[in-house]
Image (cartoon, helix red, strand yellow):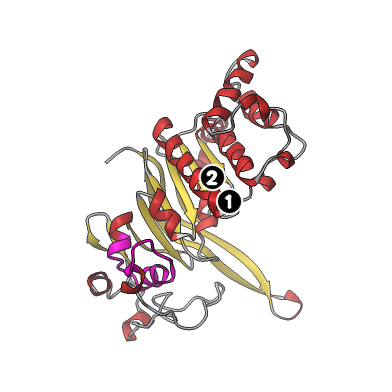
Amino acid sequence: MANETISVEGATVNFTVRQGLFNRGKREVHAVDNVSLVLHENETVALVGESGSGKTTLGLSILGLRELSGGHVLWRSESIATLSPQQRRAFRRDVQVVFQDPYASLNPKQTISEALRRPLKLHKAMPRSEMDAYIEQLLDKVGLRPAGLYMHRFPHELSGGQRQRVAIARALVLKPRVLVADEPVSALDVSIRTQILNLLKEMKAELNLSMLFLSHDLGVVRFIADRVAVMYLGKIVEIGPVETLFSEPGHPYSRVLLSSAPSVKPGEANRFSMEVMGEPPKPTSPPSGCRFRTRCPLAFDKCTTVEPPLVNLKPGHFAACHLAAEVASA
């Protein structure tokens, strides 16, 4: 197996929320609850889950933009919480992000050239005399051609797809080792999504990138990921190679997601047909035992009292379900 680039060990993120009459009551939400995950060199790991599953909070924690309540995020075997100023600067250079909304993530007062030049200046990555030529080359790589046509434009003068290409170029301008992509194509037209996904795959291969890809779109995930981690109410409930998880899901929640997703293969979605029961529980009061049990059609008494651990179904394939082996073989 390739070397690790990012390692998450028992990550927990808690929020305190106010509720009740006049917001006098307080409850703690475990947005991420004891999650462990490894991202290897030149690997794409997708985090999948519905809204509120904790995937974005985990992504922000890996970036160092959300403080952990417990556990560690390790980069080069060092906890990012204890990095020296010099190490933190190197971390900021090596771990970059592409956000969901390219218009919101770009400064409307900066031209494209200025947006890409700024990180180069901050990190003193190259002489200023070389920056314009390098930026033109990078814009050309991300498909904005001729680059000179875009250098001095502002974000509002570009289409959504063009803005996302600029956001990707900005994330790659310092030649990072890790890219966190948070729903990078969900705000784009369907016709543009494939172009951006192909661009991300090309850049990954060319720059030997590791990528953490956050999404709720299973079709996108199957196209781009090497491994998939499924999250539900702050927990990873299944993780494994992408084709294994799509063909032999071992957790009922994974089957629910697959059954609700359109498939390019006739009959495949129906094979995983499973209806979810009820509404998602409140994050402030998750169910005892298995967190999915209140919506799971296969739940039985043990699910109420015992939280299932991640069990090994196949090499690299784990699922947190008391019936994981039966579910995977169904």
Q: Is residue 258 magenta?
A: yes
Residue under label 1: 66
Q: Could you say where residue 298 lies in the image, as x and y percent from the top left?
A: 33, 82
Residue type at numbered disc 2: Leu
Residue type (three-letter) at the residue carrying disc 1? Arg
- Determine whether label 2 and label 1 are within 8 Å by CB: yes
Quarter placement of the N terminus:
top left
- Residue at figure coordinates x 49%, y 58% from the top left: 12
Q: Which residues are magenta?
A: 245-268
Q: How many marks?
A: 2
In the image, 202 versus 30, the foreground residue is: 202
Name the residue at 48% across, 48% down: 194
Q: Is residue 76 magenta?
A: no
Q: Give the crowd class for mark 1: few <14, some 14-19, many >=20 residues within 10 Å.
A: few
The residue nearer to you, when weighing 225 against 322, is 225
Check disc 1 and report its element: helix, strand or loop: loop
Label 2, on which residue? 63
Q: Is residue 292 left or right of residue 248?
A: right
Residue 146 position by quadrant: top right
Q: Is residue 21 above or below residue 87?
A: below
Seen in the picture, residue 265 relative to 60 is either above or below; the reply is: below
Which residue is pictured at 74% across the width and 34% down the height?
A: 110
Percent position of residue 17, x then y = 65, 68
Q: Is residue 29 above or below residue 92?
A: below
Secondary structure, mark 2, is: loop
Indicate the quadrant where residue 329 lies: bottom left
**Residue 91 location, x and y as percent?**
51, 35
Determine crowd level at label 2: few under 14, some 14-19, many 20+ residues with C-alpha closer than 10 A: many
Q: Quadrant of the C terminus?
A: bottom left
Residue 107 visible somewhere in the drawing: no
The Cα–Cα distance between marks 2 and 1, rounded to whole angstroms, is: 8 Å
